[in-house]
Image: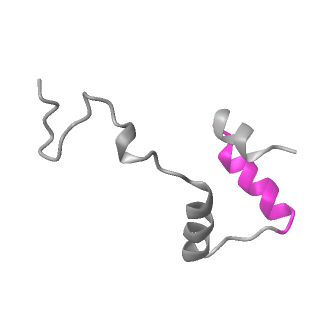
Amino acid sequence: MLSLAKALKENRLEEFIRQQEAAGVGPVKEAVFLKAASNVIKHEPRSDRTSRSASRGGSTGK
């Protein structure tokens, strides 16, 4: 069985999709996916920015 991580790493996403569809896994509604993804995707706190990060105007100060 091809995992999603391996499919992404090896550029075999279409094969993974076919495998999951054959197993009876269907498409998910976008809103449901985005809600689930927001539970696992965490953003770095703004205080973790490096001193060379671009400012609001796009300048790095250099």
Say which residue appears at 65% left-offset and 40% top-offset.
Answer: 8
57 relative position to 28: left or right? left
Give the main secondary structure, helix, strand or loop, of the magenta stretch: helix
Seen from the viewer's position, the closer of residues 61 and 34 is 61
Kindly identify the residue that appears in the image at 71 percent across and 41 percent down. 5
**Residue 45 included in the magenta stretch of the image:** no
Above-or-below relation of 10 to 43: above
Residue 25 on image: x %, y %:
79, 67
Look at the picture and state if 23 lies above or below 29. Answer: above
Residue drawn at x 55%, y 76% is 31
The image quarter in which residue 18 lies: bottom right
55 left or right, relative to 40 = left
**In the rendered structure, does residue 17 fall within the stretch colored magenta?**
yes
- Depth order, front residue of 48/16: 48
- Range of residues picked out in magenta: 11-24
Q: Could you tell me residue 40's position as x and y percent? A: 62, 56
Q: Looking at the picture, does residue 15 appear above or below residue 40?
A: above
Which quarter of the rendered picture does the C terminus lie within?
A: top left
Question: Along the horizontal axis of the image, is 15 left or right of 52?
Answer: right
Pick the quarter of the image with the N terminus: top right
What is the x, y in percent for residue 11?
63, 37
Q: Residue furthest front?
A: 47
Judge from the rendering whether residue 51 lies leftward or rightward of residue 21; answer left or right.
left
